[in-house]
């Protein structure tokens, strides 16, 4: 009954947080139901598209979930399931959910703009420049880690007998006695992506009901799996990386409803079904007393000392490894990049931001429980921390086998069925995260060019010189517009011609900026594995969460509102992530570069950029706070 106790405790904690803590945060933020959102006022049909809350929730949840709440807990379980669960539950409520809600709400209130623009408005141009550089570096790390994970999922192999299949089975492709369990899921991704424009057209252009679109999405999911069973993908990891890179290069400039939003809507049905399947299997396994829960070889509740010797000190490493399941700065980029541009009401920000994070934390709890039930400690170590340096660590395979065995113990299904289900959950959302992250990187690079060349005629018309906050006044619906100039228009616009004009025109093409983002991603992904990137990705990701909370704190200060719900979590994550980045710099990257270890130089460069930009941003934030306090006095 251990599993039932864990899941019941987590569920009650998350429900109480949604019922009581979310309204507290909404009152602090000043949520109003009658205020018009940017999606409605701008509604350009490309990026700003007012969309029903269930569809936005599906897009946002699919984008933020990805592999983060699965891979992070798998890696961090080396410290024992007790510490991991505590961090997921408490961190998810008091850090992650607050972070996601506040980031979504503030971005929406600031005209659907991302963190960099908000930092420029409230802290200054210097903060904008440094945050822009920092975010591009962080997104490059996100993309590199998830691109390698996607290739890992495609080519994951396991002995056929471990899947409880006979030697003559035809369920999976087999190479040298090992079944490749990712090919079916990868073909499913291709089919779902190809069908995405149809869903987008029906729900947005033809205004089909969400329920009807959901039924069609479920049919597409089933069809994609069927195609995958008969025609599984069979490509090398390098080829898969190039294929995915080509896709995100193109999709990053297309309207959000065409692929990004609509594919997320389809994919999220697999994730919803996957979560329900995992929870059902866990409950059944707990009732039947199956699995390894009572076995002396099971994963221990507390393995802090051994985990610290194997992977590194539990603090800060465990809090870094479990990022998306507890708190994740990447979520603020999704919130300020695409999500805030689609919300039809301010209340939707709470439903999408706060509730979405709680559901992600629940997914992370379910992952922990699956590993407790489905894997012995020696199997877990063999997948994630193999003794043989020739064997590549594979957290994805650990999760897949854990789900397979849990489904077998609880529901009596073949291990292969559960493992396939796990792969289907992972593969689609790895691609979704890459799609979103490359689009966000494109936005940031475009903002960088806009800042650098705002005095030139080609960019002057696009300059973000005014911030409009439109609010409905009372029940009469009288529009009140408050215009706050951010910076005076430049009196001297430079007229361009010849090579200069051609060069600036080149920088305005979306595929150029998407290409820069894809190029940086490939540089990191082709020289390092996901496990090498995960530590710095997790560190930078948690650091971004801290900075997002600090910027939100600045926004609250300007509005003269309560700040401790954002400030305290920000301080904790700031200390934790900076400690980890300094440790990586001193103990890994600098020695690695000196010894000529391949792949260390890009990681060292990213580490230095992140630390330098963070130092400057914090200094400017503190200066802003000091000035704000002086103004009040």
Image (tube, rainbow, N blue to C red):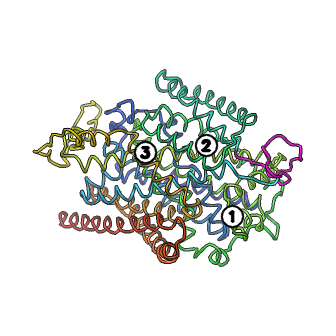
* Quadrant in the picture for residue 420: top right
Residue drawn at (40%, 35%) of the image: 344
| Residue 296 vertical placement versus 497 (above, below) | below
| Residue 213 vertical placement versus 137 (above, below) | above
- Specify the segment rendered in magenta: 160-182
Near-viewer residue (441 or 102) = 441
Q: Is residue 101 magenta?
A: no
| Residue 253 vertical placement versus 449 (above, below) | above
In the picture as drawn, the residue positioned furthest to the top comes out as 206
The residue where tag 2 is placed is 428
SS at mark 3 in the image: helix
Question: Relative to 159, is 61 on the left or the right?
Answer: left
The residue where tag 3 is placed is 515
In the picture as drawn, the residue positioned furthest to the front comes out as 499
Residue drawn at (40%, 42%) of the image: 340
Numbered badge on residue 384: 1
- Distance from the alpha carbon under mark 1 to that under mark 2: 22 Å
Residue drawn at (75%, 54%) of the image: 401
């Amino acid at each position: 009954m251990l599993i039932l106790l864990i899941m019941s405790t987590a569920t009650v904690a998350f429900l109480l947080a949604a019922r009581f803590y979310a309204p507290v945060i909404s009152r602090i933020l000043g949520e109003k139901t009658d205020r018009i959102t940017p999606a409605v006022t701008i509604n350009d049909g490309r990026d700003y598209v007012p969309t029903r809350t269930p569809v936005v929730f599906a897009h946002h949840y699919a984008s933020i979930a990805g592999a983060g709440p699965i891979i992070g807990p798998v890696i961090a379980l080396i410290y024992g399931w007790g510490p991991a669960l505590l961090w997921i539950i408490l961190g998810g409520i008091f850090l992650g959910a607050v972070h996601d809600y506040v980031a979504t709400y503030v971005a929406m209130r600031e005209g659907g703009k991302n963190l960099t623009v908000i930092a420029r408005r409230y802290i200054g141009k210097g903060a904008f420049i440094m945050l822009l550089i920092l975010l591009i570096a962080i997104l490059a790390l996100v993309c590199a880690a998830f691109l390698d994970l996607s290739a890992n999922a495609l080519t994951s192999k396991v002995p056929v007998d471990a899947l409880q299949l006979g030697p003559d089975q035809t369920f999976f492709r087999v190479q040298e006695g090992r079944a490749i369990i990712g090919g079916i899921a990868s073909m499913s991704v291709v089919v779902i992506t190809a069908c995405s424009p149809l869903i987008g057209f029906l729900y947005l252009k033809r205004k089909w009901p969400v329920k009807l679109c959901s039924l069609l999405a479920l049919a597409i999911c089933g069809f994609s799996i069927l195609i995958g069973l008969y025609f599984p993908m069979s490509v090398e990891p390098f080829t898969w990386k190039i294929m995915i890179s080509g896709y995100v290069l193109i999709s990053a400039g297309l309207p959000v409803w065409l692929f990004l939003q609509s594919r997320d809507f389809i994919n999220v049905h697999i994730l919803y079904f996957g979560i329900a399947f995992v929870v059902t299997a866990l409950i059944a396994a707990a009732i039947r007393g199956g699995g390894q829960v009572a076995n002396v070889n099971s994963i221990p509740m507390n393995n802090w000392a051994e985990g610290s010797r194997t992977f590194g000190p539990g603090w800060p490493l465990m809090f870094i490894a479990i990022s998306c399941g507890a708190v994740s700065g990447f979520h603020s980029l999704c919130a300020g990049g695409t999500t805030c541009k689609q919300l039809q009401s301010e209340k939707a920000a709470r439903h999408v931001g706060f509730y979405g994070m709680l559901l992600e934390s629940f997914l992370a709890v379910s992952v922990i429980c699956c590993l407790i039930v489905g894997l012995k400690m020696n199997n877990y170590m063999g997948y994630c921390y193999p003794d043989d340096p020739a064997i590549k660590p594979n957290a994805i395979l650990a999760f897949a086998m854990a789900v397979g065995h849990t489904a077998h113990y609880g529901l009596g299904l073949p291990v292969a069925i559960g493992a396939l289900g796990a792969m289907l959950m992972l593969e689609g959302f790895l691609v979704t995260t890459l799609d979103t992250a490359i689009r966000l990187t494109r936005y940031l690079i475009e903002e960088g060019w806009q800042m650098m060349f705002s005095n030139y005629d080609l960019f002057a018309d696009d300059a973000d010189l005014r911030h409009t906050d439109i609010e409905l006044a009372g029940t009469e619906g009288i529009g009140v517009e408050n215009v706050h100039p951010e910076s005076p228009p430049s009196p001297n616009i430079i007229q361009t011609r010849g090579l200069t004009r051609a060069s600036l025109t080149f920088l305005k093409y979306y595929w150029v900026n998407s290409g820069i983002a894809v190029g940086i991603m490939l540089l990191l992904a082709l020289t390092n594995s996901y496990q090498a990137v995960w530590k710095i990705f997790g560190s930078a990701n948690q650091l971004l969460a801290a900075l997002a909370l600090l910027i939100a704190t600045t926004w609250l200060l300007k509005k003269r509102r309560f700040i401790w719900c954002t400030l305290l979590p920000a301080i904790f994550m700031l200390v934790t992530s900076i400690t980890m980045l300094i440790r990586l710099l001193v103990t890994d990257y600098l020695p690695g570069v000196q010894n000529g270890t391949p792949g260390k130089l890009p990681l060292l460069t990213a580490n230095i950029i992140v630390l330098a930009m963070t130092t400057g941003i914090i200094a400017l934030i503190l200066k802003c706070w000091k000035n704000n306090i002086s103004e009040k006095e």
